[in-house]
Amino acid sequence: MKLKKRINPEVERKLNDAIFVGRLVREDELAGTPLGEPVYFKDEFNDDIQFHIKCLSPIPEEVSKQFYFPNKIFTGGTRSSNNYRKLTEWIDYDRIHHFEKKDKIREYFENKIIVFKMNVKPEYIYVELIKVEDTLPSEKGYSIVPGPQLRLNEEKEDFEKKLVEIHRPFTLKHYPHIFDLPEFIYYQGNLYKIDLKASTNTTTYTQQESHEVVYSPSIDELFMNCVDVRIDDHLFFVQQDRMPDLRDAVDENGRNLNSQVEVGKMREVNSEQVEETRESKQDQEFEYKYNKAEIDFINLLEKNAKRRGLYFNNEDLFTFHISVKTNLLSIIGGMSGTGKSQLAKLYGETMGLEYGEELLMIPVSPSYHEPNDILGYLNPTTGVYHESETGLVNLLIEAEETPEKMFMVIFDEMNLSQVEHWFSPFISLLELEESNRYLTLFNENSYCVNNKYKPRVKIGNNIIFVGTVNFDETTKNFSDRLLDRTNVIRPTKLSFKESLEIARNEEDTDEIETFNVQATIYRNEWFNKKESKTSLSFLTAEEVEILDELHNLLNKNDFQKGVSFRVALGISRFLANIPSTEEGQLLINRSVSFDMQVNQRVLTKIKGLESYVEPLVGTYSEKEYFKGEIVDLLTSEKAQQISSFDKSIAFLKSKAKELMLYGYAN
């Protein structure tokens, strides 16, 4: 679908949670449009196939008002890696002869309901396939009835209390605020007629306090007869012409939910207890504040990355930003040649740091074995301090003298040598309060003729340390001592097709814009002060339970492994500092962020011999994957209510493959 102008980024983010249904377009619906056949080869010289889908479910007005054409016809294609993978799974697309592919796709889509998401580009919206239902599509179209996503150990009664008694927010997972407020919610055989209002997060709602809730019990059979597509228990696509039947059922058999709930229990509790209940960490909605300057900086970072030809998912850019502002040290890992060092350098330059001045890049040598290799040493005979050629001490001194100014040090390929040896003084300093964070260069009783150098240099909050690492046979493993104190971020490598798509929309310049940030703003105003550095205040009880179980699994066969209190604090701090837009939308969904943190701070410790690693990560046999204990945990019902853990599970599977190939995991 061609757009009049680019979709607002906030609307685009909300659209990521939305799901739609449609069918393959008919020939007669293409008459008078510039579109070709329902399915066709885009280019006769390659096998890129496009197909057109007629959307049959509601489209948000914020999106549809940007359409050139009102026909609700969207285009998808095999250029999308997701679509290619789905078609290969469904019809063995990758094995079909070139000239048969178009007909096979059309035959597969014909007279079926196609479930999809919208992939927003600057000028177009494309179809990203989810699944295909072998059901004849309703020509009248579909209405959407959402279902609530409850927390661990919550029951239907808890959800009903949220509707009529406590008015706490609840989540409608695939129903973002860009849709009209829903008329009904369906859950476990009951259809609730509600009157909602949007809450802070994009898929969070509360019931209007002044409106009573009517529900129809035991409506399961009628409701499911009206539903053609369901997405788990979170979304139901109801035939549009059957909606009157549901309304009649609620009107005729409806009961007042308010009278069913024991409101008297709340009245018997004194006001102090009510307040404690509302402030319960398990149930409260965490407070995220919007900071315009921070969002402007992140937007500028995205723009500068494209100008420099650095092709990263926005999610990876956001993750790097959160990690850097909440940790003194962040590590970017991955295969060689993916732009890790350039990403770190770009971040500093976007902050207005000048390369070679406030921004220092130190290529780590395999010969580094002790702190003197990067710092230098004091000659006790002459009293001369010989600074290392890295220039690190000079930068640290300047940073101490100008505490409002930001500085960045990039240790490039930092694991070419054993990090815990040459970086050891810094590891001990990483978790100390700023007032106690001093790096010792030489004994304070020693004589030094260079007045510039002092026995101790303060490592302030105005310094950012970033390490880039590769994981191959030429590098050294990290100790758990270091992993406890940092995030190891592995940016997703985009496909060349995706990178080419970004490149086509790049501005014709490689000049970057800067956003000068003072240290107090960066470490204070952009930092969530409600998150205590010594408590797990931004973790829910369910998240803590998962961390406890992960610790038990890692620790049972090796008492030196596990999830330390330091790691849990780091995860809490990361979750507390996800930037929020003006509309209250988090740049990274909390469930995705928790998955990232488990992957970056916990699973990185899984390494060693097959006897230890295999029970945890699972194994492959004849290309079939058999789950390990951690995947069993992360795919359990209680874990899935927190996050899908897609990234963590993918990482564990990669570890299982590594184990199969080498009998050892790094």
Image: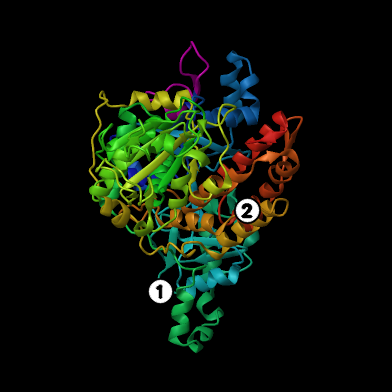
Q: Principal SS element in the magenta part?
A: loop
Q: Residue at x 59, y 67 (%)?
A: 154
Q: Which image quarter: residue 272?
A: bottom left
Q: Amino acid at mark 2?
A: Gly
Mark in the foreground, 1 or 2: 2
Which span of residues is magenta-colored? 28-49
Left or right for 570, reference 527: right
Q: Which residue is mark 1?
A: 209
Quarter of the image with the N terminus is top left
In the displayed orientation, state which residue is furthest to the front.
381
Asked if residue 308 can be seen in this view, the reply is: yes
The total number of labels drawn is 2
Within 10 Å of the Cα at label 1, are there few (<14), some (14-19), or many (20+) other Cα atoms? some
Circle on res. 330: none
**In the rendered view, how is the structure colored?**
rainbow
SS for dot 1: loop
In this picture, is 204 found above or below 392?
A: below
Q: CA distance from mark 1 to mark 2?
A: 45 Å
Say which quadrant the C terminus sits in.
top right
Q: Find out whether residue 47 is within the magenta segment.
A: yes
Residue 144 in the image, given as x and y percentages of width and height:
49, 52
> Which residue is at the front of the view, 178 or 311?
311
> Which x, y percent locates residue 645?
58, 47
- Residue position for label 2: 562
